[in-house]
């Protein structure tokens, strides 16, 4: 074979040999040379992918120091192997597959940087020369930087995606199911309800520190740095801009014994209907009051929401009330016992009048939502308070009695479309499981439960007291309204338009006569009603009913009246099912009366 047809060992030798030949011969020789030989390109790139190959062979092969150090020789060897995409060779591919298993081992996963460093050293030893060329080093470094940038971008994307996902402690297979308790935070606007909710979520590890730091930065940009904790619950942009909760915020946290759902009710009087919807799902209410001079007085006066919220919570069926005296770290208060006792003295008589028993149902405690004092850990400055901090106190409360074998009753709070029809609500009684057939009242639609989420965690069955998201089959989202009830077919809930009820007039300037219209709030349902007839007055002390029909009722009187709703609503008598038999009547933005359903009157067709 002519020596011109083969690639020479060294270009310099070739030049010396060809020097005496003519120019035409030289050009023919150069044309015959395969300068753009393929194998050289993958070999340069292969440096990035070689480490895994060396890693797997380093153990078996003898030390590489005896290997010949001729670079051209190594190039020729590399050139004989068929190139594969991405600069790796077929043998690389085989060994890479083996190394994935090694990487999964605890030793293999110990930090990428150390691994890279080790691989580079091995690479240098394997090449025999003092390591890869400058170009290759640059290429490697650039590649590493790109990889790091990609990793950073990936991490950022993951972080953004991770934020809304709920953090739930993995349940042990044999662990008993924790009791669900729904806690509603109520009180006057700006008392600190959302801030306390956000602080509790942070203290129990449901919100990461990094997320809160992000909120803090954003809040500082808007000159609202003390609001950042409330942003964990006020997710709406409008709520964040104005600093007022509008819709009932939902979140949850777990203690050793219980699983709590936080319902963060709005304090502003314009959004009381939303607050009633939140309170109707609660087992326990936390009345937040501000100890700051002037703020407590504003909230507790006639127009303040402290009074109205406490009364509505009682009407909604909340049995236990914790009063959190917030902002105790304020300079005007400074953990003062006198101020704490003053707030307590004013509140107790009113709460007693609403129907709470001060000895059994009410528990007072001081705290600071912004600093988190006395929420999880006791406060050194507050020596006079000897009780448990807030979260520990919640954990130590006695269990609530609920009947899981009763009829299924799930009042619907909200609905939306998401790969089917999704409804939200709290299961009041009975139990629901996947693939169960249920009936939507009052429209009598038969539906099937496709999937069940309890506080955003998928389960197969749910017990009373749990906040559920159900994906339903057999009904469109437009056919459902908040206030509808999900029941089992064997025991449907009652529905109708006319009912008799005992009502207490709480606040109304003039008299109320038959024909008076108001807005009825019963469980999660909101409907316009008319008082069609006044049946009798009830004596508050003796409970005796008057013999004659009254022509009107006025403030502080108790009467039995017949009410007629504008549309068909689901309801039960208070005796049979208290949660669906108590209601409030509102008009002109004020709560006028509270009542309980005594009897359902069948409609005359």
Image (cartoon, helix red, strand yellow):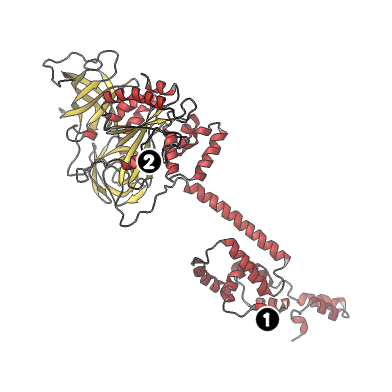
- Mark 1 residue crowding within 10 angstroms, few (<14) / some (14–19) / many (20+): few
The residue beneath circle 1 is 66
Give the x, y percent position of residue 463: 26, 46
Q: Is residue 476 visible to us here? A: no
- Residues packed near mark 2 inside 10 Å, few (<14), some (14 to 19) or many (20 plus): some
Q: Is residue 583 above or below residue 96?
A: above
Q: Is residue 106 left or right of residue 561?
A: right
Rendering coords of residue 479 (x, y %) = 30, 38
Tags 2 and 1 touching, CB below 8 Å: no
- Disc 2 is placed on an element classified as helix
The answer to which image quadrant residue 571 occupies is top left
Position of 271 with respect to 318 (left or right) is right
Residue 248, by quadrant, is top left
State which quadrant residue 201 falls in: top left
Residue under the point 44% across and 38% down:
198
56 on left or right of 473: right
CA–CA distance between discs 2 and 1? Answer: 69 Å
Furthest residue in direction bottom, as rendered: 1
For the residue pair 361 and 333, the one nearer the viewer reads as: 333
Q: Position of residue 119 (x, y in %)?
A: 61, 68
Residue visible at 68% across and 74% down in the picture: 127
Residue at (13%, 20%) from the top-left corner? 544
Q: Which residue is mark 2?
A: 391
Question: Residue 104, image x and y in percent?
Answer: 49, 66
* Total numbered badges shown on the rendered structure: 2
Camera-side residue of 247 and 305:
305
> Which comes before the other along the chain, label 2 or label 1?
1
Q: Is residue 359 left or right of residue 251?
A: left
Camera-side residue: 206 or 92? 206
SS at circle 1? helix
Residue at far front of view = 383
Whether residue 440 can be seen here: yes
């Amino acid at each position: 074979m002519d020596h011109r047809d083969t690639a020479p060992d060294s270009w310099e030798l070739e030049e010396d040999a060809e020097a005496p030949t003519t120019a035409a011969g030289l050009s023919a020789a150069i044309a015959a040379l395969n300068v753009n030989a393929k194998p050289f390109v993958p070999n340069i790139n292969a440096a990035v992918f070689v480490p895994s190959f060396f890693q797997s062979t380093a153990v078996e092969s003898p030390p590489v120091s005896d290997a010949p150090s001729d670079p051209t020789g190594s190039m020729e060897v590399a050139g004989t192997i068929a190139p594969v995409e991405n600069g790796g060779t077929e043998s690389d591919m085989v060994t890479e597959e083996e190394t994935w298993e090694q990487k999964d081992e605890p030793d293999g996963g110990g930090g990428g940087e150390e691994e890279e460093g080790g691989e580079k050293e091995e690479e240098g030893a394997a090449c025999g020369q003092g390591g890869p060329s400058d170009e290759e080093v640059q290429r490697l470094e650039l590649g590493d930087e790109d990889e790091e940038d990609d990793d950073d971008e990936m991490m950022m994307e993951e972080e953004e995606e991770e934020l809304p996902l709920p953090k739930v402690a993995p349940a042990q297979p044999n662990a008993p199911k924790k009791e669900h308790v729904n806690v509603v935070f109520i009180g006057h606007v700006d008392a600190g309800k959302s801030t306390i909710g956000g602080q509790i979520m942070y203290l129990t590890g449901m919100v990461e520190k990094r997320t809160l730091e992000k909120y803090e930065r954003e809040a500082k940009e808007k000159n609202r740095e003390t609001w950042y904790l409330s942003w964990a619950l006020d997710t709406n942009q409008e709520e964040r801009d104005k600093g007022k909760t509008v819709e009932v915020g939902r979140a949850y946290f777990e203690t050793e014994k219980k699983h709590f759902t936080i319902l963060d009710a709005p304090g502003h009087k314009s959004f009381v209907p939303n607050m009633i919807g939140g309170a109707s799902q609660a087992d326990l209410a936390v009345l937040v009051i501000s100890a700051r001079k002037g703020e407590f007085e504003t909230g507790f006066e006639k127009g303040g929401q402290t009074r109205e919220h406490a009364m509505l919570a009682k009407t909604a069926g909340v049995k236990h009330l914790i009063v959190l005296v917030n902002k105790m770290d304020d300079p005007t208060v400074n953990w003062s016992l006198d101020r704490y006792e003053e707030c307590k003295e004013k509140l107790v008589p009113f709460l007693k009048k609403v129907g709470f028993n001060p000895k059994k149902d009410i528990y007072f405690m001081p705290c600071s939502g912004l600093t988190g004092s006395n929420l999880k850990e006791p406060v050194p400055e507050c020596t006079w308070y000897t009780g448990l901090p807030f979260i520990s106190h919640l954990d130590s409360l006695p269990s609530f009695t609920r009947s899981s074998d009763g009829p299924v009753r799930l009042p619907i709070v909200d609905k939306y479309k998401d790969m089917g029809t999704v409804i939200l609500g709290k299961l009041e009684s009975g139990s629901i499981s996947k693939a169960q057939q249920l009936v939507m009242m009052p429209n009598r639609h038969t539906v099937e439960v496709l999937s069940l989420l309890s506080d955003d965690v998928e389960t197969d069955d749910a017990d009373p007291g749990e906040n559920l998201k159900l994906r339903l089959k057999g009904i469109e989202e437009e056919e459902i309204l908040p206030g509808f009830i999900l029941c089992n077919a064997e025991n449907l809930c009652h529905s109708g338009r006319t009912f008799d009820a005992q009502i207490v007039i709480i606040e109304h300037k003039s008299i109320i006569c038959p024909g008076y219209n108001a807005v009825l709030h019963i469980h999660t349902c909101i409907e316009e009603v008319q008082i069609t007839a006044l049946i009798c007055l009830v004596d508050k002390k003796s409970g005796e009913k008057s013999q004659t029909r009254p022509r009107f009722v006025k403030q502080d009187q108790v009467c039995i009246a017949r009410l007629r709703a504008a549309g068909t609503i689901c309801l039960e008598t208070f005796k049979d099912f208290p949660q669906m038999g108590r209601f409030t009547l509102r008009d002109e933005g004020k709560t006028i009366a509270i009542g309980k359903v005594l009897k359902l009157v069948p409609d005359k067709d």
